[in-house]
Amino acid sequence: MSQQQLTFTALPDIPLIRPGDDLIAITLAGLSAAGVTLRDGDVIVVGQKIISKAEGRFVDLKQIHPSPEADALADETGKDPRMVELILRESVEILRKREGLIIVEHKLGFVCANAGVDRSNVKNEEGGEWVLLLPEDPEISARELRDGLQMASDVEIGVLINDSHGRSWRMGTVGVCIGVAGFPAVVDLRGQKDLFGYSLRSTVIGLADEIAAGASALMGQAQEKLPVIHVRGLPYPLREGSLSEILREKELDLFR
C-alpha cells in the first residue's frame, strides 16, 4: 500500500500588504523562497486579511456616523456604535446578540460574528481608527489569484481564501473557506461503499473547510506573518467549486 501524505507549507517572507499590492507576484516570490515549484493538483490557501488589505477594504471609524438602529444595537451589546453601523451595512440579518457580540448573516451568505469587521492586525495611520472589512467578493478574488498563478506556472491548481470563524456548539475559532476557485468545496460520497459494503447515505465532506482549517493552524492568529500556505497531496481531484456548495439552506439550519 502506497503512503499518502498531505503537506502544508507556510510561505516565508510575505510582506505587510498594502492596497494595490500584487498578490500573484508576492505568492510566487514566497513559493520561490520556500523552494516550492507548483505542480498540478497543488492548492494555495490565502488568509482573508491580506486579500482585504490588497483590495483596500479599510474603513476609518472616524468617518462613520451611526444610524439610530446602530446606536440602539450598540446600547444592547456594549459595542462601539460605529462598528455596529459597519456590521449592519455588511449584513442582511441579525441572528443573535449578546454583550460584546453580534451574530449575523453576512451579505456574502454565511453566518459569522460581527460581519467579519475586524480591528486585529490593522495598523492605524494618519490619525485614523482603521478597521478591515471582508473582501467584496472572495470568489472573484480567489479566481483572479488562481488564474494568475496558473498562467505564471503552467499548472492546474486550486485557491482557497480562509477566515477564522467561531462555531455555535463548540469553543474556539477555526479556519473556514469563504472563497474558492478550482477546488471542490465539498466532496459528495453518498452512494459509495464503506469497508464492509454499506452504501453511504449522508456523507458529504466539507473539504474546503478541512483544508482551510489545516492552513489556519500554520497561519496563526497574532504576529506570525504567515498568511499564505501551500498544500500538496490532496486526496481528491480538483474541479471548479463554489462557496454556495458549503452554505446550508436556511430551512435545513437547525441553529438559526
Image (tube, helix red, strand yellow):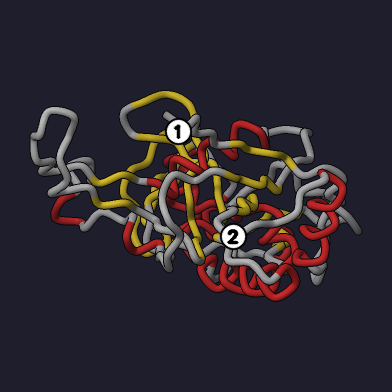
Position in image of residue 37 (x %, y %): 75, 54
On the rendered structure, is 15 left or right of 160? right
Question: On the picture, is 168 further left or further right than 146?
Answer: left
Query: In the image, which disc is placed on residue 99?
Result: 1
In the image, 87 versus 67, the foreground residue is 87
In this rendering, the label closer to the viewer, 1 or 2: 2
Question: Which quadrant of the figure has residue 6?
Answer: top right
Q: Which mark is residue 56?
A: none
Q: Measuring from the top left, give residue 23's x and y in whole percent.
A: 76, 64
Task: State the residue in front, 93 or 232.
Answer: 232
At label 2, the amino acid type is Asp
- The mark nearer the N terminus, 1 or 2, is 2
Q: In percent of the image, x 64 and y 53: which residue is there?
A: 46
Q: Name the residue under label 2.
A: 40
Secondary structure found at label 1: loop
Residue located at (80% from left, 69% from top): 22
Q: Which residue lies furthest to the right in this view?
A: 126
Where the N terminus falls, by quadrant?
A: top left
Q: Distance between the residues labelled 1 and 2?
A: 48 Å
Residue farthest to the top? 171
Amino acid type, callout 1: Glu
Q: Helix or strand or loop: what does disc 2 sit on?
A: loop
Q: Where is residue 17 in the image (x, y as percent from the top left)?
A: 81, 57
Choose top left, top right, bottom left or bottom right for residue 246: bottom left
Q: Can residue 255 be seen in this snapshot?
A: yes
